[in-house]
Image (spheres, rainbow, N blue to C red):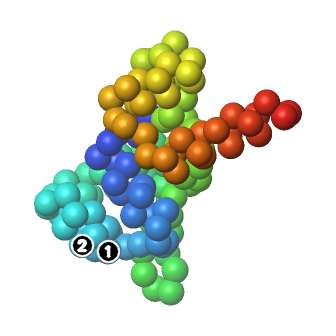
């Protein structure tokens, strides 16, 4: 399932707090993105059709919940980026970022620990 960048804003709001009503989503996502009510409701409807979120009634209110875990979404998106731009290879991705954005000392240490941990397996 492909979630667009715009739809991801709605998903992020739902991952942070659920259930949320359409009004809650319009207030949170609409305000942060300067989108109107119609735009946010269109995104909600798209996500419903994709079965990325579900609609339910709770405590007399209509709310929305995500059907996809954020970790699954992040994995899919990051793997897609890796496949599209770096032929599925992790080293060129890290090299690219290291060449175009200086790594902070703590980032270098975390990468070293990650690599050392992988080498031990």
Query: Which percent across, then down, holds residue 96?
Result: 41, 24
Question: What residue is rendered at 52% in x and 50% in y?
Answer: 106
Q: Quadrant of residue 32?
A: bottom left
In depth, the one of 74 and 61 nearer the eye is 74
Residue furthest front as drawn: 105
Mark 1 neighbour class, 10 Å CA radius: few under 14, some 14 to 19, many 20 or more: some
Tell me the tag on residue 27.
2
Query: Which percent across, then down, holds residue 55?
Result: 47, 63
Mark 2 neighbour class, 10 Å CA radius: few under 14, some 14 to 19, many 20 or more: some
In this rendering, is residue 6 above or below 101? below
SS at mark 1 in the image:
helix
In depth, the one of 117 and 26 nearer the eye is 117
Residue 51 visible in the snapshot: no
Residue furthest top as drawn: 87
Question: What residue is rendered at 42% in x and 30% in y?
Answer: 98
Whether pointer 2 and pointer 1 mark residues with C-beta atoms closer than 8 Å, the reply is yes
Tell me the tag on residue 24.
1
Question: What residue is rendered at 48% in x and 35% in y?
Answer: 77
Q: How many marks?
A: 2
Q: Quadrant of residue 97?
A: top left
In this rendering, is residue 4 above or below 48? above
Query: Which percent across, then down, holds residue 118?
Result: 76, 34
């Amino acid at each position: 399932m492909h979630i667009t960048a715009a739809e991801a804003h709605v998903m992020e709001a739902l991952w942070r707090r659920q259930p949320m009503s359409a009004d809650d989503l319009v207030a949170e996502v609409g305000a942060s993105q300067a989108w109107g009510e119609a735009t946010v409701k269109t995104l909600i409807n798209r996500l419903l059709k994709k079965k990325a979120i579900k609609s339910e009634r709770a405590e007399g209110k209509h709310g929305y919940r995500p059907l996809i875990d954020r970790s699954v979404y992040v994995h899919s998106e990051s793997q897609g980026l890796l496949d599209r731009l770096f032929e599925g290879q992790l080293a060129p991705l890290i090299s690219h970022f290291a060449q175009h954005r200086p790594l902070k000392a703590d980032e270098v240490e975390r990468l070293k620990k990650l690599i050392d941990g992988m080498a031990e397996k």
